[in-house]
Amino acid sequence: MTEAQRVWLVERSYGNDEDLVTLVFATIDGEKHRKKQLSHNMLYGKTITAAREESLDDLDDVKDPETRERYANEASRMAEKHDPDDEV
């Protein structure tokens, strides 16, 4: 069984031409992230929480130092202000 890691919502963006919403969840240190793209229809009725558990195998490295720092700052902010299962 693969180990799970808590990741926090650090970014939510909306596509210009497409009906897509991009959600990025990152570890508290900003080192790893998981990006999900969902259509507005897929999000309808779905609860997005402040944090979630993801398999370590499903997380990607954050290579850019500035992005890593931004993700770490936002993940820390989310962790301070929200419980993991708070709807955001």
Image: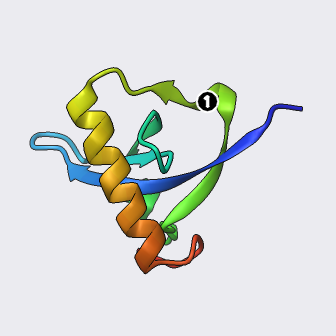
Residue 61 appears left or right of 22 = right
Of 86 and 43, which appears nearest the observer? 86
Q: Is residue 87 visible?
A: yes
Instruction: Find numbered disc 1 in the image and state the secondary structure of the residue it sits on.
Output: helix
Residue 82 appears left or right of 20 = right
Picture quarter containing residue 67?
top left
Q: Is residue 74 above or below residue 29?
A: below
Could you tell me which residue is drawn at 49 percent across and 25 percent down? 60
Residue 13 appears left or right of 9 = left
Q: Is residue 7 above or below residue 85?
A: above
On the image, the x and y values in percent for residue 86 come to 52, 78
Label 1 environment density (alpha carbons within 10 Å; few <14, some 14–19, many ≥20): few
Could you tell me which residue is drawn at 24 percent across and 47 percent down? 19
The image quadrant where one finds the N terminus is top right
Of 70 and 55, which appears nearest the observer? 70
The image quadrant where one finds the C terminus is bottom left
Could you tell me which residue is drawn at 28 percent across and 54 percent down? 12
Q: How is the image coloured?
A: rainbow
What residue does disc 1 label? 58
On the image, the x and y values in percent for residue 25 come to 45, 48
On the image, the x and y values in percent for residue 87 come to 48, 77
Three-letter code for the amino acid on which mark 1 is drawn: Asp
On the image, the x and y values in percent for residue 31 come to 45, 33
